[in-house]
Image (cartoon, rainbow, N blue to C red):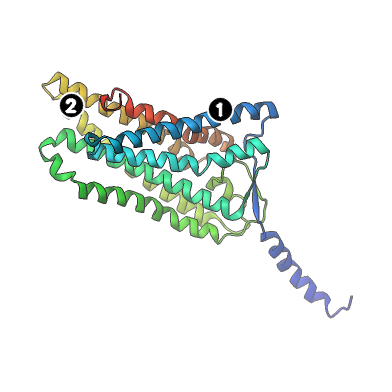
Amino acid sequence: MLPSTDPLIRKLRPKIMRQNQSIIFEFILLGFQEKPEVDVVLFILFLLLYASTLVGNFLILAVICSNSTLHSPMYFFIANFSSLEVLLTSSVIPKILVSICTTYKAISYLGCLLQSFFYFSFGSTELLIMAIMSIDRYIAICKPLQYSTIMNHYMCACLGISCWCTGFILILLPAILMFQMKFCNSNIINHFFCDSKPLLRLSCTDSSIIATINFVISTVIVLSSLMTVLFTYIHIIVTIVRMSSVTGRQKSFSTCVSHLMLVALAYGGTIFIYVVPNQRYALDKNKSVAVLNIFVTPVISPFIFTLRNKNFS
């Protein structure tokens, strides 16, 4: 090789290597890394849970749509929540089932980033809807005479649209930044879906800014909606305790208990994974909690909504 070209090659080699490294067309999802016989059990279990989620939530939607007596603010927001449960699980579970069944664990670069975007958008919208549901119960129980005036059809539509738009817009910024990232360290994701934390660890560019933005957005969404729920339910409980009618007290408590059960399930796992700082070794724990969020909670929520509810019996 000519001496004059040697420095040029040395200068270009790192650039060429970086370009080659950054070309990642797909990611590999490690999933659960179980034995084949365990995979069969997981596939059947997850398929049954997913089918139960779809059936339960679609039944709720069908009952609400077909029964004119349920065309009220409370059931309007329940219908929104059930729709989100279907969309959230459907953005993740089909790919998980395919990965377990066929052992094809690859997901395209675009598919991975889109899966992450929709999962977090639907999840954020769910938390906001739950906060609105608590406000609806607060007005119904604490300000019953003003309820029909405040929670009219226009207000319900505005609140519902605001939740959906806010959930998607807040996730849009980190999603755009992630689309601009380069991944070259590896294409193996230690998870069963494209979660943001393990995905960011594969970046060969500085991901600290996106990680900080993700943490701030998660904290704002979770804590603001949770504080709204707690604030409204403190007032609700005080109002219920002061009620003179035993029947009215029992009816109000039954409605609130079902909502609080759902809040505990949804917020517990979300706070553990996305708000509480954790270390690298916590990824396996995060996967276990994510199973509860993705597979278990959406199955339980239809039963919680219909629990002691005569309109669904």
Q: Residue at x 53, y 36 (%)?
A: 286
Which residue sits furthest top? Answer: 246
Q: Is residue 248 left or right of residue 28?
A: left
Q: Residue at x 30, y 27 (%)?
A: 312
**Residue type marked 1:** Leu
Distance of mark 1 from mark 2, alpha carbons? 41 Å
Where does the image place residue 188, in percent across and percent down from the top left?
A: 66, 46
State the mark number for residue 37. none
Query: Foreground: 106 or 267?
Result: 106
**Residue type marked 2:** Ile
Q: Dot 2: few (<14), some (14–19), or many (≥20) neighbours within 10 Å?
A: some
**Residue 228 visible from this viewpoint:** no
Where does the image place residue 127, in percent across and percent down from the top left?
A: 36, 42
**Residue beneath disc 1:** 45
Residue 25 higher or lower than 81, as above or below: below
Quarter of the image with the C terminus in it: top left
- Where disc 1 sits, the SS reads helix
Mark 1–mark 2 contact, CB under 8 Å?
Answer: no
Residue 26 higher or lower than 191, as above or below: below
- Where disc 2 sits, the SS reads helix
State the mark number for residue 240. 2
**Residue 43 visible from this viewpoint:** yes
Q: Is residue 180 left or right of residue 311?
A: right
Where does the image place residue 300, in percent across and percent down from the top left?
A: 41, 28
Where does the image place residue 249, in percent across and percent down from the top left?
A: 18, 23
Query: Foreground: 72 or 276?
Result: 72
The quadrant holding residue 285 is: top right
